[in-house]
Image (cartoon, helix red, strand yellow):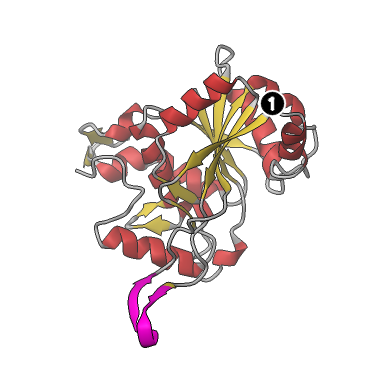
Amino acid sequence: MKVMILCGGQGTRLAGASADLPKPMVPIGGRPILWHIMKGFAHWGFRDFVLCLGHRSDAIKQYFLNLSLMIHDVRLDLSDAQRPVALGQSDEGGWRITLAETGLDSMTGYRVRLGAAHLDPADDLFAVTYGDGVCDVDFTQVVAFHRAHGKLATVTAVHPPGRFGELQIGDRGAVHEFNEKPQVSAGWISGGFFVFSRGALAYLPDDPAVMLEEQPLRRLAADGQLMAYPHEGFWFCMDTPRDLQQLTRLWSGGGAPWLVWDPK
């Protein structure tokens, strides 16, 4: 099953913190958030990716074209014009990546429609997510849930992080606990981790302005074809410089909740 990752947006709300990088390439702990997302999927056994590119697609292509050289020892022979040779193996060596140009101004629904051209004919399912959100969900369970209910679409439902720090206040105003951006215990939102059956592609019109989150998902819901997989664990979307700082602190502190793979 292929995992389609939407990587074409401009990330304007990260302006000043992204150094003109596309949002999926903004680093957390020295690696792009896109790498973190892909590592999570790979941990659960999903290693075949379609990256739907748009804004600064060149930066994303250059990163993956050179990734093996960046993470391994490299042998060079300067006496001839042979390409550098990467030495060693890594988990990323098992990844298959399709870098799909889906248009500079395309909206999310159209990017999925164009990315679908790279699905394997035998695949009855495909996953879709965004290039700016990390989560510790066991995606094998999301896929199993999707197969069990038999509808066309599944969205992972999550509790949103609180906008501001949460205070637990006791008698006389004493603060017993302060939680920076805690997970809200009540209410659900889309976590942006989807599983679709092929039939859902019929809900995507041939229109670059169509947004996945609007007409297509609303029609699927109205037709009784959209189900929610509730995830009680960690989820976080990097939308602002403050969000980037929060994720960086979590990673630097050694307790990044989305780190489900072995970091060694």
Instruction: Tell me if residue 158 is in the magenta stretch.
Output: no
Residue 158 x, y percent position in the rendering: 51, 47
Relative height, residue 252 to residue 207 (above, below)? below
Q: Which residues lie in the magenta part? A: 167-179
Query: In which quarter of the view is residue 117 placed?
Result: top right
Instruction: Tell me if residue 177 is in the magenta stretch.
Output: yes
Residue most toward the top? 122
Relative height, residue 219 to residue 123 (above, below)? below
Horizontally, is 33 left or right of 54 in the view?
left
Answer whether residue 130 is visible to the viewer in this image. no
**Quarter occupied by the C terminus:** top left
Q: Which residue lies at the image location 39% right of the left edge and 86% below the top edge?
A: 173
Residue 56 x, y percent position in the rendering: 57, 51
Query: In which quarter of the view is residue 129 placed?
Result: top right
Q: Which residue is mark 1?
A: 200
Would you say the magenta stretch is mainly helix, strand or loop? strand
Q: Looking at the image, which is closer to me, 178 or 252?
A: 178
Q: Looking at the image, which is closer to me, 228 or 83?
A: 228
Query: In which quarter of the view is residue 192 placed?
Result: top right
Q: Amino acid at mark 1?
A: Ala
Q: Secondary structure at mark 1?
A: helix
Residue 137 x, y percent position in the rendering: 42, 40
Residue 151 x, y percent position in the rendering: 64, 23
Q: Which residue lies at the image location 27% right of the left edge and 43% below the top edge?
A: 71
Horizontally, is 91 left or right of 125 in the view?
left
| Disc 1 crowd, CA 10 A, few/some/many (<14, 14-19, 20+) | some
